[in-house]
Amino acid sequence: MLNSRQRAQLRAMANGYDTIFQVGKGGISEQLIKQVDEALEARELIKLRVLETSPSSSREAADEIAQEVGADVVQVIGSRFILYRESKDKKTIVLVK
């Protein structure tokens, strides 16, 4: 579980990140979950976007995907959201205490 200082740190880091996945009219598929899981293992911090055609809201999609892959929702703002999960192998992000 992230504290407020860690969330602020991750939000600041994610500012310069590009959105790498989109949730569209197909909703959240097994393939998307698999790709998000792999991306989190490689990067630890990723940004996603929910399109207007998606059956889920940004918050719903963020919560569902985070639960599926065991990640923390850092922020949901508008149609975008940020997920964080510590990598098992290569820990590239050092969180503040």
Image (tube, helix red, strand yellow):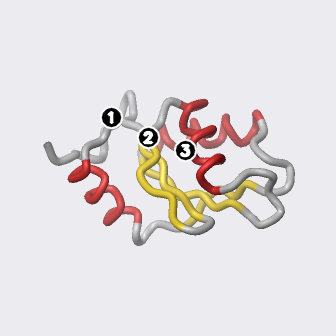
Q: Could you say where residue 47 lies in the image, as x and y percent from the top left?
A: 53, 58
Residue tagged by mark 2?
72
Residue tagged by mark 3?
39
Q: Nearer the viewer, mark 3 or mark 1?
A: 1
- Residue drawn at the location 57% of the way across and 38% of the way down: 38
- Disc 2 is placed on an element classified as strand
Q: State the residue in front, 57 or 80.
A: 57
Q: Which callout, 3 or 2, points at the residue further toward the start of the chain?
A: 3
Mark 2 → mark 1, Cα distance in angstroms: 7 Å
Q: Quadrant of residue 31?
A: top right
The N terminus lies in quadrant: top left
Residue tagged by mark 1?
1
Q: Is residue 25 above or below residue 30?
A: below
Judge from the rendering whether residue 52 lies leftward or rightward of residue 9; answer left or right. right
Q: Is residue 18 above or below residue 24?
A: below
- Amino acid beneath label 3: Ala
> Would you call the spot at circle 3 few (<14 residues within 10 Å), some (14-19), or many (20 or more)?
some
Judge from the rendering whether residue 77 lies leftward or rightward of residue 21; answer left or right. left
Q: Could you say where residue 59 lies in the image, as x and y percent from the top left?
A: 59, 52
Q: Which callout, 2 or 1, points at the residue further toward the start of the chain?
A: 1
Q: Could you say where residue 81 lies in the image, as x and y percent from the top left?
A: 53, 58
- Residue drawn at the location 64% of the way across and 47% of the way down: 60
Residue contact between numbered discs 2 and 1, judged by CB atoms under 8 Å? yes
- Residue drawn at the location 60% of the way across and 30% of the way down: 68
Q: Is residue 70 above or below residue 18?
A: above
> Would you call the spot at circle 1 few (<14 residues within 10 Å), some (14-19), or many (20 or more)?
few
Q: Could you say where residue 75 lies in the image, as x and y percent from the top left?
A: 44, 56
